Image (spheres, rainbow, N blue to C red):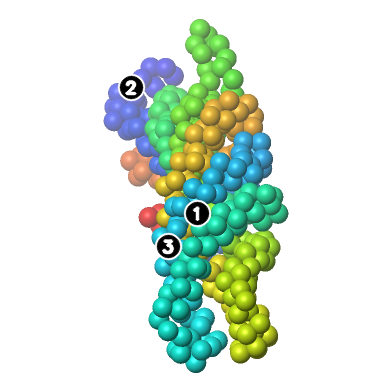
Amino acid sequence: MLAAAWTDFQLNMWLYLSMPITSGVVGYVTNVIALKMMFHPLEFFGIKPPYLGWQGIVPRKAGKMASIACDTIVPRLVSEREIFSRLDPQRVAAEIEGPIVQLVDQLLEELMTEYEPTLWETLPLSARALIAKRVKNDAPDVVAAVMDDFKTHVDTIFDLKDMVVTTLMRDKSLINKIFLETGKQEFIFIERSGFYFGFVFGIFQMIGWTFFKAQWQLPLFGLLVGYATNVIALQMIFRPQTPMRFLGTTIHGLFFKRQKEVSRDYARLIADEIMTPSNIIESVLKGPYADRVFNMISKHVKKVIDDQSGLARPFVAWTIGTRRYMDMKTTAAHRIVRHLPEATRKIDHYAKEAMSIADTLAGRLEVLPAPEFEGMLRPAFKEDEWILITVGAVLGFLVGVGQLLVFSVLGKAPEPTTPEVQGALDALTPVAQLLSQWPWA
């Protein structure tokens, strides 16, 4: 038997040697496809409701992933109060004084023209300038007072978790970017390891085919390669969580071996793309506590209007009506709140430096215990890892069937004409058609 097998191997050497190469390619391709399926497409592709189709695991679970990450980050690693406590109200007022002054000029003209055009037109230019000057002089103090209020009541006006989840749900490509950049080395390993592990499996496949040829053997090996290369790669990334000695070698999950580097990349992306000063301010003004924020700002704006009216306040209220006077103050507050996000972009550089979110997060993530570090990124998509593994197994099986057909044509195996094999091929045809149309880009 051994002599016959060796003779057959020599006569068909290139066919046999193609098995490890083919198996390696299968391992590589199935791992690449599995990675693509983790992140693409951003929106559901297929027949809705989703009976047949796919949406990338990460985009589909963006809200859940962001929520899980925030449960780790907030408040253990960084809190709303800590972020705001680093801002100096006087410095913030000084930074945005220019935009606020321009905004005051614009709103003063709009409000007076809208609510009391006749009175405003009859006022001498010097009087108008005096009113504008007094309001603008008070503007920095009002900004500082509002910032003080924000710092005091930050727990009731700002929800950091809601801001992160809302930002990532609005831009699903952003969460892809976070995963792809922080885990770039691990993903490269998954792709390459597919070939290496597939090649090793292919050697066993080659040896087995040399001595024993059956219709089920090649499809079975293809299925095992597609399944095992994904499973092994995922296990090597996340296991073991702590270094272990094995056969004189230290084994450590790749993700945890790079914890410091991953922490720095993750913290930088969170600070640069999500927890930006602009996003924080916009979330404060438009988030779930927007009404409380408006009332807080409105209180200061209305006080300034009343103070600037001074002795003339009863006269102003009489000329335009008490109700319209109150409406004017409310309108002024609404318009200021509407324009604040644009005006406060001037503080981005100072706020980013003062908050120091990237350095804070990186330093604390670096020392996070391994289970919590893994729990920050993996649990949400871990639920669907079985789908990726199954797809890898199916693709490997399809390649195995293809090998069987090729070997049959070349006379190295019985023709796969049994009802069982033919039925399997017919059942897999729709799967192959769907995969050929997949939008991987």
Residue that mark 2 sits on? 7
Spot occupied by residue 237 in the image (x, y as percentages of width and height): 52, 30
Q: Secondary structure at mark 3?
A: helix
Q: Quadrant of residue 374?
A: top right
Residue 78 vs residue 344, the one in the foreground? 344
Circle 3/circle 2 CB separation < 8 Å: no
Residue at image x 53%, y 29%? 363
Camera sees residue 65: no
Q: Secondary structure at mark 2?
A: helix
Amino acid type, label 3: Pro
Circle 3/circle 1 CB separation < 8 Å: no
Q: Secondary structure at mark 1?
A: helix
Residue 347 vs residue 183, the one in the foreground? 347
Residue that mark 1 sits on? 93
Residue that mark 3 sits on? 99
Circle 2/circle 1 CB separation < 8 Å: no
